[in-house]
Structures are given as C-alpha cells and as structure tokens.
Image (cartoon, rainbow, N blue to C red):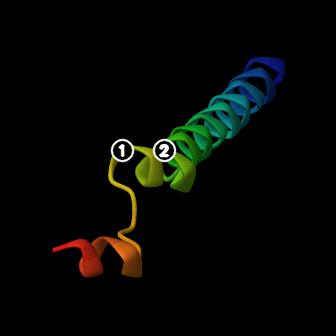
Amino acid sequence: MIKMWLFILCLIGLLFISILLVLMLLKIALKTEDTSRIDPIPNDDDYEKH
C-alpha cells in the first residue's frame, strides 16, 4: 500500500515539475521586449524620410 502512495506522489510531483517547466519556457519564448529590440516598430518619422 505504501508503494502505491509513493508512486502516486512521485507521479504528481513529476506532473507539477513538467507543468512549471512548460510555463517557464512559454514565458521565455513570449518575451515582448526582445522582439521590439530585434525588429523595432517603425515610427511615422521613418516613413517621412523615404
């Protein structure tokens, strides 16, 4: 009986860690500050220069 509870607790822990890892990776992948530094949004001044 104890083996079953230990197995269930390990599965729940692994699931929790996996969810946290996915959320952290999504947060890193969706950083909006990085995209504006790589490809800045053009201003109206940029259009007037051309």
Give the answer, above or below, for where 45 lies relative to 23: below
Q: Residues within 10 Å of mark 2 (few under 14, many from 20)?
A: few
Q: Residue at x 15, y 74 (%)?
A: 50
Identify the disc placed on residue 9: none
- x, y percentage for residue 14? 63, 29
The x and y percentages for residue 11 are: 64, 32
Q: Are marks 2 and 1 in contact (CB under 8 Å)?
A: yes
Residue underneath mark 1: 38
Looking at the image, residue 4 sits to the left or right of residue 29; the answer is right
* Residue 29: percent from left, percent from top: 45, 45
In three-dimensional space, the C-alpha distance between marks 2 and 1, rounded to whole angstroms, equals 6 Å
Q: Indicate the quadrant where residue 40 lies.
A: bottom left
Residue 49 lies, with reference to residue 18, above or below; the image says below
Q: Secondary structure at mark 2?
A: helix
- Near-viewer residue (32 or 43): 43
Quarter of the image with the N terminus is top right
Q: Which residue is mark 2?
A: 34
The type of residue carrying mark 2 is Asp
